[in-house]
Image (cartoon, rainbow, N blue to C red):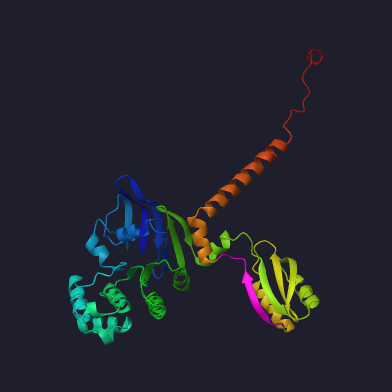
Amino acid sequence: MITVKHLTKRYGSHLAVDDISFTVQDGEIVGFLGPNGAGKSTTMNMLTGYISSSSGEALINDTDILDNPIKAKRDIGYLPELPPLYQEMTVMHYLSFVYDLKKCKLPRKAHLTEICNLCQITDVKDRIIKNLSKGYRQRVGLAQALVGNPPILILDEPTVGLDPKQMLEMRNLIKRLGKRHTVILSSHILSEIQAVCDRVIIINKGKIVADGAIDTLAQSMSQNRRLKVRLDGDAAEVLQALRAIKGVSKVQQSAQHEAGLYDYELTPVGNEDLRKAVNAAAQANGWNIYRMESGVLTLEDVFLKVTMGEWQAEQKLSASAATAGKTAESAAAPAATDDKPENTQEEAK
């Protein structure tokens, strides 16, 4: 488990990481996102003990990375954006060198052979690293992170420079690793994060601006849950059936695309997710669904929304509107009065 408490890093007057806190549980695959200069790599370097923090704590399985770096680093496998490879060594010689550096106690030959098979570098294990392609060098970098079988993997841009086939292979490998390791994965390729990660943490200007499961973040930031669907079938019958679905407040039909093929836009009551109900209605009536598009944001939409400040502005606007509404209600409410008549001099007598 990784626990970060009020982690801060200053470079002179520049505040690179500003008092961030988060926890990564055992077995999670977490995507760590942020625009260039957001403090992403600085945070990962502090987690691995590569640089020290100005204040705060980074705990690796309850061990402070600064107080006991040897013990903490034993639990970490780190792949930096530029893998630390010795170009003149063969792949197996290099991995054996890393094995000695980490003082690994596992059976050398069996352990390194398993890693080579897992990273699909067995066929190049006797070749000199400088003669390998970019994709193979990236795999060798990942292999060195796996030496010693650390419970935590921190991967900074693991697919940078890879071709589409190599990216897919690396993505599948990270998924497999996530079954046995806790993984923090940094990448600028949002589709990769969406395909691999259970959760995302987005950092911007040194602060965490979003943290949660991708679907949960997307739904919470979506202003509407309208569903657009393209169906065949008799338009009048389709409209009647869609309007009868529980949770639908309004259905609009657009122009005809082909014979008997229309687009319909369904507005839900509140945040109701209508996709399953529409699919069930289509099956029951023998319609074919040619297109279905939800109003929920994609990960790219979420990323842009929080890093450009739009989400924070919307939250402030909503809070201001709520405050204004309460103020208006208070002003409209009648003032409390004392129903007792004032004592007159006559009554006093």
Count the marks.
0
Q: Is residue 347 visible?
A: yes
Is residue 67 inside the magenta stretch? no
Q: Position of residue 139 (x, y in %)?
A: 31, 77
Which quadrant holds the N terminus?
bottom left
Which quadrant holds the C terminus?
top right
Q: Is residue 104 left or right of residue 249?
A: left
- Give the magenta-colored segment's residue range: 287-297
Pick whichever, 59 or 30, lies toward us.
30
Residue 105 falls in which quadrant of the image? bottom left
Residue 288 falls in which quadrant of the image? bottom right
The residue drawn where x is 32% and y is 71% is 151
Task: Decide: is 119 above or below 56.
Answer: below
Pick whichever, 232 or 328, lies toward us.
232
Q: Is residue 260 left or right of residue 67?
A: right
Q: Is residue 104 visible?
A: no
Residue 330 falls in which quadrant of the image? top right
Q: Position of residue 137 (x, y in %)?
A: 28, 76
Pick whichever, 31 or 330, lies toward us.
31
Q: Position of residue 278 (x, y in %)?
A: 69, 75
Is residue 290 inside the magenta stretch? yes
Task: Decide: is 2 above or below 275.
Answer: above
The residue drawn where x is 42% and y is 57% is 203
The residue drawn where x is 27% and y is 63% is 72
Q: Position of residue 217 (x, y in %)?
A: 53, 62
Pick whichever, 59 or 112, lies toward us.
112
